[in-house]
Image: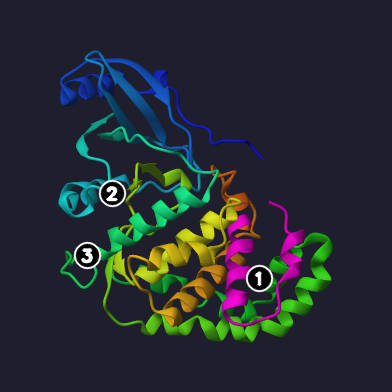
């Protein structure tokens, strides 16, 4: 598995796009450093301008035939354009966009701050509290109708699907390698409980808030005590517990703090519904149980490794929340 994703170099960016960048920013780009993170091959650069300023460029471009990558930059641009006041100060400032030769790029504030991982207690606490403040800023409020209200519902039903699909069930067991026998026994014992824990997420009522829906280490920085978030194409409206569950398990999956500590720091600012959080955790674990054992999709060679680590963190959490026996077989699942 490659250590980082393959990204275009500045030389690959069309000259016409570079001219437009200079025009929009009102200053000439003197250097462009590739920025790595995540597992997608988007074109990302930290630009240095002749006046000393720095700008972040996120671009998409024509993909080779057969790639499994799906761009969503138009959606993300709409979020920056129409929700700019709502998502500030947690989001970077939107400076404009450019298009040329099949390329489309956003120009954004170059966010400073601490990168993750590694995670430490103090910085994780600051991040969790700031994340709660972000959710608290819109919870129960009015948000645009064009924002999806059903994205969290797409995670309901994966455990039921695995239970009904012998191939999916065997694929999940096979991911445990030498722990296959333990995985089979544990899943045979607990699959019904996991499947029963998902449906309540579909019945969750308000209050809802604006969700980032993709909050993980490569999409964030900690600037003082403020969590800065980028990559907003999945922004939607829904229960804060789902965003929190996804974020907390991603921290633990990277060798960070236990999810329960992250939830505790979050709740110092915004209380959550325990039953909704449990349903969210179970649903997220089901998603990774379905996706993580699959082959690498074309163009995304690191995706499954990330998902396997998140499967281990989320399923262990779901087992604790549902008072199930610990899924010790997860230790045999390779990163």
Residue on which disc 1 sits? 168
Question: Looking at the rendering, in which quadrant would you find the N terminus?
Answer: top right
The residue that appears at 74% across and 78% down in the rendered structure is: 186
- Left or right? Give the position of 138 relative to 284: left
Residue 143: percent from left, percent from top: 18, 65
Which residues are drawn in magenta?
A: 309-335
Q: Considering the numbered disc 1 on the image, is that residue within a helix, a strand or a loop? A: helix
Dominant SS in magenta? helix
Residue 199 versus residue 315 in the image, above or below: below
Near mark 1 (Cα within 10 A), the count class, few <14, some 14-19 or many ≥20, is: many
Asked if residue 93 lies left or right of residue 119, the reply is: left
| Structural distance between the alpha carbons of marks 3 and 2 | 13 Å
The residue identified by callout 3 is 138
Q: Which type of secondary structure does the marked residue at label 3 adopt?
A: loop
Q: Residues within 10 Å of mark 3 (few under 14, many from 20)?
A: some
At x 38% / y 74%, what residue is drawn?
272
In this view of the protein, which residue sits in the foreground, 156 or 109? 109
Residue 55 position in % (x across, y down): 28, 28
Q: Which residue is mark 2?
A: 90
The tag earlier along the polypeptide, 2 or 1, is 2
Q: Position of residue 265 (x, y in %)?
A: 43, 62
Between 125 and 203, the one nearer to me in the picture: 125
Q: Residue at x 29, y 34 (%)?
A: 105
Q: Earlier in the sequence, mark 1 or mark 3?
A: 3
Applied colour scheme: rainbow
Question: How many labels were placed on the picture?
Answer: 3
């Amino acid at each position: 598995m490659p250590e980082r994703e393959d990204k275009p170099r500045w030389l690959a960016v069309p000259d016409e796009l570079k001219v437009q960048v200079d025009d929009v920013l009102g200053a000439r780009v003197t250097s462009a450093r590739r920025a790595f993170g995540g597992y997608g091959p988007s074109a990302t650069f930290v630009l240095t301008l002749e006046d000393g300023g720095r700008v972040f460029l996120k671009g998409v471009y024509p993909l080779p035939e057969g790639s499994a990558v799906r761009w969503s930059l138009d959606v993300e641009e709409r979020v920056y354009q129409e929700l700019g006041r709502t998502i500030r100060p947690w989001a970077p400032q939107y400076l404009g966009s450019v298009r040329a030769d099949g390329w489309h790029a956003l120009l954004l504030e170059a966010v400073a701050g601490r990168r993750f991982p590694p995670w430490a207690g103090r910085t994780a606490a600051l991040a969790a509290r700031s994340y709660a403040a972000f959710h608290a800023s819109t919870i129960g409020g009015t948000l645009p109708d064009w924002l999806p209200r059903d994205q969290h519902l797409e995670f309901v039903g994966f455990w039921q699907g695995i239970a009904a699909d012998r191939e999916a069930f065997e694929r999940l067991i096979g991911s445990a390698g030498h722990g296959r026998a333990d995985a089979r026994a544990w899943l045979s014992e607990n699959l019904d409980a996991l499947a029963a824990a998902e449906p309540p997420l579909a019945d969750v009522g308000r209050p809802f808030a604006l969700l980032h829906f993709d909050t993980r280490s490569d999409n964030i920085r900690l600037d003082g005590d403020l969590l800065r978030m980028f990559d907003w194409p999945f922004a939607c409206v829904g229960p804060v517990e789902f965003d929190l569950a996804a974020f907390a398990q991603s921290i633990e999956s990277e060798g960070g703090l236990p999810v329960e500590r992250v939830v505790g720091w979050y709740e110092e600012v915004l209380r959550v519904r325990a039953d909704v959080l449990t349903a969210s955790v179970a649903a997220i674990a089901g998603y990774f149980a379905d996706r993580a054992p699959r082959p690498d999709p074309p163009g995304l060679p690191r995706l499954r490794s990330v998902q396997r680590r998140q499967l281990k963190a989320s399923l262990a959490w779901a087992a604790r929340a549902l008072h199930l026996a610990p899924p010790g077989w997860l230790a045999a699942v390779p990163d």
